[in-house]
Amino acid sequence: MPPITIDSHSLMIAGRRTAISGAGVEYAAMDPSVRSTALRSFASLGFNTVMASCPWHLHERVPGGFDFTGRLDVAAFCREAHEVGLRTILRIGPAVGAPFDGGGLPAWIGDLSGVEPRSGVPGFLELVSKWYAKLAEQLVDLQADRDGGGPLLAIQVEHDWRSGSASSGPNYLQELVRYSRERGFTVPILTANGFWSPAEGAIETWSGWDGLFSNVRQVATVQPEMPRICVINRDDQSSAFRRPGQSGSPADPSDLADRVARVIAAGGHSIVAHAFDGVFPAGATGRDEYGPISPAPFVSPLVDGLGRPTERGRVVGRVARFVRDFASLIAGIDPDGQPLVRDLDQDSPGSIVIPRPGALGDLVMAFRRGEDERVPLVDRTGRRVPISFGGHQVSWRVFNADLAGQGRLDVTTGTPLPLLNGRMLLLSAPAGERVEVSIDGRPLEMTAPGGGRASRVKFDPVIEKIGSFTVVLIDEERGDQILDQFGPDGVEAIFIGVSCLRPDGSVEASGESEPLRIAIDGTVTRPEVLEAVTPRNRKARAWSAWSEPDPRDPSHPRSIPMDGDLGLASMGAGLDHAWFTATMQVQESKSQTLRLLGGLADVQVWIDDESMGRFADGEIPIQSLKGEHRLALFAGHRPRPVEGVRAPADGDRPGALVSVKPLAGVETSAVDHPPIDPYSVMSFIPGAAEGELTSSSGVELTFTHRRKSSVLLEIEPGAAGIVLLNGTAIASFGAEGARLRLSSADDEHFKAGKNRILILPLEFVAEAGIEPTCSLLEVVEEIVSADAWRVRRFEPAPDPRIGNWNGAPTGDSTGPRWMRGVLPLKKGRSASIPTGGATIRLDGLTRGRVRVNGVDLGGYALRAPGERIARNSEVPEVSIPGSLLAEGERLELEIFDEGGADPSKVVVRF
């Protein structure tokens, strides 16, 4: 087996160094029919590694029910990546972070007693061990250190465990490392916890957007014997993801390429996160501090949802391709050779040059700042080596560089881009500029082609031979119009002036440029160019609504009585919806406020078949309704925090429906209290540093309660801290708030008399000026008991055994519904679509899921049911793979919309 070893430079496979040029690609957001095309596009852009998350909550939606099929076939993802020369790094959890619902932890974990997520408690670790075992069954034989060299280069355990518990953190993370080894994972193990809590035997990676150059350099001080791997993301910014009805802020292509280059200049290995524009299944994405995240979350993709490279991808690919093809040079750079330089992360005039010496050649990177066109350099022999930027923000030169073991590049005044199979070297320079190049002591001078409008349309590269090497020179403008073509033995040619390659060898042109193909031996051909197709929108015809017995009726054929206090997760619908129905007996004739104590946060309510609207936080105000009434709830899964911590709304069941009123006689005051250790209450507290205590002052609620009725403590979102009841710490709460039910019958610390509740915020919360806001309510009457509900579980597709398509929707409905529209395909239409795909634009809808020709394409979110569409809202779009277009003569669209919105504005864009 080829061993994988590590040192401060890089990873080494069988003694051969490798530089990681990576992109984040979530297989769970990728239709299987697009997977191969998309992975080939990443390879053609120059990447050699893809990183993906293994979302436990999708693979095990119900306890013991593991799914590794379709878009969740992680082994197929790895194999298909390997077929085009890509290695894989997999985040195996248990938590994998944003944008996943609950950080990727299964929703049903919240139902289990003795299980504290993201902690070292035995109950949780036992579940993790089983999860790792199932993953290992899929992946162990695909590891890169197996005979033949598989695709799996490394795994990552946990993600963003940024909590300073000195007692639980290291032990928990160390157990994850041990469990993964015991399950058969032998490749290197990574962690990504911001260096809050290192784990022995694992490589800590850095993640971020700003300060990359200085931060990656600092990693060498903290972790001197390990390679510096950096994931470039903006996960801590509000605009990093798409959100329902909101567009994100796409990264500027040149700026993103600049950031990748900063990591390389600092001696690091870069992975660009969120690089594929995928769509997750409905319910798969969570919420962060800025709100819910869209099922199509990624705003700065390098490859679009149909598997085509984007303009951003081609610009970043210029850097990625250089890193891939000069991997031995980059991986061999002296990690300790960090010269004193101007700060790359600060905006200041004047370009910046970073020299990096190494055992297999020297690298000099230049970063344009201001209006500089070039930077004049002098090498150690006194030779002038200018660096011209052309239209780019970053450029580079190499000296005495290894050429894949086939020779050495002594020097060049052009920018080296691909090095194909150690036989062809492609250089770029501004049009008309003289370029010097020397290989193995053999000098050559060339002049970069281009200049003038005619050359922008059609150009001829300069091609020369130096010994057995083919040297190709193109103008700088075309440096980010390159895609690689793969054959059985790797890259066999490059295409220039193209935006997309099709499997049959035809191409789409990039702008005005006439594409060309250059084989490794220097042969130039003009490929077939697809005729540009003007995008056209078409609407589906004959929309009809699904008709079945009324799910609000308890006698619905799929309605069953609740067997205990059950919720969405426990019935296998943890990321979906369900109908809950009950008969309620109201004693009071006056208006009341009702609470669902099971934690449902997003429900649509009907009383006696009349819509009462949508309510949040389990609160239902009702008018005079004395007597017996039919109650129906359509309950949706509420996105859980990506940190993987529980919140009051994580409860996914109705629970008891009670009438509440403000508790009388409550006195509120600010009091001082000795700080306490919050880790004595819970093991994982996001953002709390080691030694963090509670504030020395808090909010005290004093009251007398002699009745047998319960009391509800509600803490509004914003703060985080500890709850003490009569001097005993009973609970913690995070930024999502809390709801606690207290009574003398259920809690030994609650007294039938005078009680004191103290809310102590964490120290860093208090220092930020965030004060907890809370209230106390008295439970007046139980209207519906927790086990008196009937449930009709949501089904991911209409079931013809109980219903049929009947009639056309007329405007908006008052509730959720399935809708179907048919779109005839013109004969031969799919052949005229550049990559055999199309896009559904879901205008006018609320949120839900989309199926086309029986295939679930994922979820969408524009607005909550009942809300108006905000001005300038971004309309969600879902890609239709070309395989579905080629299957027949029509597209059958099935849309489940939670608000039952009118589908007449939905269009398909070809």
Image (cartoon, rainbow, N blue to C red):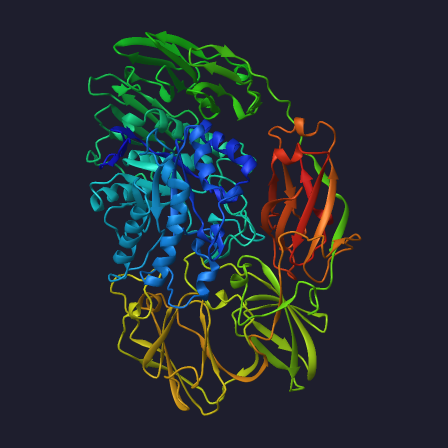
In the rendered image, the quadrant that contains the C terminus is top right
Left or right relative to 150: residue 836: right
Instruction: Out of 642 and 83, give the one closest to the viewer.
Output: 83
Q: Position of residue 634 (x, y in %)?
A: 63, 65
Residue at 39% x, 41% y is 139
Residue 626 picture quarter: bottom right
Left or right relative to 792: residue 109: left
Q: Is residue 231 visible?
A: yes
Q: Position of residue 53 (x, y in %)?
A: 42, 45
Residue at 39% x, 72% y is 771
Left or right relative to 633: residue 167: left
Q: Position of residue 688 (x, y in %)?
A: 31, 62
Instruction: Out of 884 and 272, give the one closest to the viewer.
Output: 884
Q: Is residue 450 visible?
A: no
Instruction: Out of 442 and 385, give the one closest to the viewer.
Output: 442
Left or right relative to 886: residue 229: left
Instruction: Out of 14 and 559, give the one closest to the viewer.
Output: 559
Q: Position of residue 212 (x, y in %)?
A: 33, 42
Is 8 placed above or below 318 here?
Answer: below
Residue at 67% x, 33% y is 887
Residue 815 picture quarter: bottom right
Is 57 placed above or below 747 here?
Answer: above
In the rendered image, the quadrant that contains the N terminus is top left
